[in-house]
Image (spheres, rainbow, N blue to C red):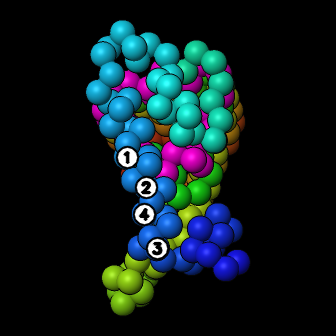
Amino acid sequence: MTTERDKMEAGAWHSCLDPALESLRVAALEAVHAHNHLPPAARRSLSTPLRALFASAGSDCIIETPFHCSYGINIHLGDAVYINVGCVILDSAQVHIGDGTMIGPGTQIVCADHHRDPVQRRAGIERALPVHIGVDVWIGAGAIIMPGVRIADRAIVGAGSVVTRNVAADKIVVGNPARPTRA
């Protein structure tokens, strides 16, 4: 691992202030800006700027505006993924979102984990942990998905929940931190 990007991709501690990483973030900002300023009719499918930016994207995906991502190059969408307004994906690591998943408005998916030491944090030292969201998952409005979390197929995350641990298939989690519920 010689570059900060290599370290980031390996999940190792790296400097997010690296110029090469900044260049990738600027490219993402350009694509996101283009997407967010398309006429509404042009956003009824995944926009060309985001499709070109993302690592992979299936068919029939919709991302409402406004939308934000850090890099875009680490986002993988399955078929028929729906992402509602105000979603933020901080994709310093891989983010996989499975077929048929619906993500509510104001949801945040976060891969960046900043250093605990304030001197290191000030120097931009962080690590990136992947997030995996399975098939047919429903994430309620305002949920926050933390670094390194896996949400298995058909799970439901209640609105406003903060998901700090993995969620098993077919489970419903709610709260802060999100916990299983009987519903």
Relative horizontal placement of residue 140, taking residue 85 as reference (left or right) = right
Q: CA distance from mark 3 to mark 2?
A: 11 Å
User: Badges 3 and 4: C-beta atoms under 8 Å apart?
Assistant: yes
User: Badges 2 and 4: C-beta atoms under 8 Å apart?
Assistant: yes
Q: Earlier in the sequence, mark 1 or mark 3?
A: 3
Q: CA distance from mark 2 to mark 4?
A: 5 Å
- Which residue does the image show at 65% across and 35% down from the upper left? 56
Q: CA distance from mark 3 to mark 4?
A: 6 Å
| Percent position of residue 128, x then y | 56, 64
Q: CA distance from mark 4 to mark 1?
A: 10 Å
Residues in magenta? Answer: 62-87
Q: Is residue 112 above or below residue 32?
A: below
Pointer 4 residue: 22
Instruction: Say which amino acid is labelled 2.
Output: Arg
Instruction: Say which amino acid is labelled 4.
Output: Glu
Please, what secondary structure does the residue beneath circle 4 have?
helix
User: Badges 2 and 1: C-beta atoms under 8 Å apart?
Assistant: yes
- Which residue does the image show at 34% across and 82% down from the upper left? 122
Q: Is residue 33 above or below residue 147?
A: above
Q: Is residue 114 above or below residue 107?
A: below
- Which residue does the image show at 42% across and 63% down from the upper left? 22
Instruction: Say which amino acid is labelled 3.
Output: Asp
Pointer 3 residue: 18
Pointer 2 residue: 25
